[in-house]
Amino acid sequence: MYTKQALRELGVTPGTLSAEQLRNFDEQGFIIVENVLSPEECARMREAFERLHAAEKDQGGHEVHVEPGARRLSNIFNKTDAFDKCLWIPEILAVSAHALGEIKVHGANVRDPVKGYGQQDLHVDVPKKFADDWWVVNAMIMFDDMTLDNGPTRIVPGSQWWAPINVPYVNIGDWEPEPLSEEDAARVPADLSAPYPGEVLVEAPAGSAIICNSSMWHSGTLKKSDRPRRMLHLTYTRRDLPQQLTQLDYLTPELYNRMSPVKRYLLEIEPPKPGDGILRQPKKDHKGWWN
């Protein structure tokens, strides 16, 4: 099994994304695709989130990180089949393969920031060793509208081509930072929480996917309203890199049995066989989280 074969079996073709979408992703670092989920699917996923979070409460997301100021869930596919559709959205798979090559699921965390929280410093989720050394694609799949008053993500278009800044320790892997060039140093603001020239506050309706290069400078912003902003952060990574949540460590018979061989390949839930190779880097202790 290999990625192109797996994606073709899942309905991803060379025409899944337009040339303009691919160009925008390459140049700007993100695209927004609307209507990847129906209103009925969004409603089902909102209900599943509320039901599971009511059971886990303050421990929600504990498999990855419990985040003060946000309601979270992790390890979601072993708990319900409600979110399965998100794994096989053709546009997300197509962008991930376009950017990364051979891919697998990296992580999946449902998140809803609480009013008065969500403000973050500018950062990148992962580093890189050279200009187009992309490690992760992050799809923010919206179950509710993302608006200017419920904590929209802010992004700096095109910044994936710049030096990585403020990388969470847990995601550094085997990367060693190098001194910044004069040009890169001039781009880094003194205050990472302040507005940045050219930044965009992303607005997107429920049912859409905001697909981002995780090397792009971005951050959360303050949530000013009580209006929910439930979304799934679904990330894909290269197959030589570790998963955020090692799916095999949490695998249930129910999840394994409802996944086809192609889907098991992309989730990486088949036990490793001799000759599969080893990951390029060890996984570090969790001292941060994907946001």
Image (cartoon, rainbow, N blue to C red):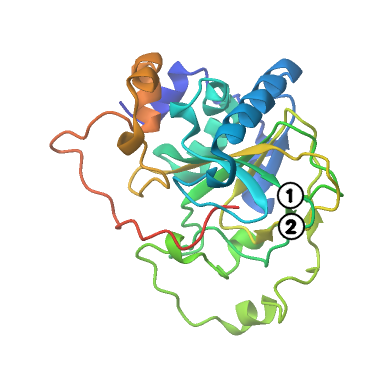
Q: Is residue 89 left or right of residue 278?
A: right
Nearest the camera: 75 or 145?
A: 75
- Could you say whether the residue bearing mark 1 is in a helix, strand or loop? loop
Q: Which residue is mark 2?
A: 117
> In front: 277, or 98?
277
In the image, residue 201 sits, relative to residue 32, either above or below, namely: below
Q: Percent x, y for residue 255?
A: 39, 21
Cβ atoms at labels 1 and 2 below 8 Å apart: yes
Task: Classify mark 2: residues with Cα within 10 Å, few (<14), some (14-19) or many (20+).
Answer: some
* Residue at 70% from the left image edge and 73% from the top image edge: 192
Q: Secondary structure at mark 2?
A: loop
Residue 243 place in picture, x, y as percent: 39, 45
Badge number at residue 155: none
The kind of residue tagged 1 is: Val
Disc number for residue 114: 1
Above/below status of 263 relative to 74: above
Q: Residue at x 86, y 48 (%)?
A: 225
Evaluate whether residue 37 shows in this view: no
Q: Residues within 10 Å of mark 1 (few under 14, many from 20)?
A: many
Question: Distance between the Cα atoms at labels 1 and 2?
Answer: 6 Å
Q: Residue 157: x percent and y percent?
A: 72, 57
For badge 2, the amino acid type reads Tyr
Q: Is residue 39 visible?
A: yes
Residue 51 figure quarter: top right
Q: Is residue 241 above or below residue 91?
A: below
Q: Residue at x 40, y 15 (%)?
A: 258
Left or right of 272 in this view: 254: right
Please tell me which residue lies in front, 106 or 230: 230
Q: Is residue 150 left or right of residue 258?
A: right
Q: Position of residue 203 (x, y in %)?
A: 81, 43
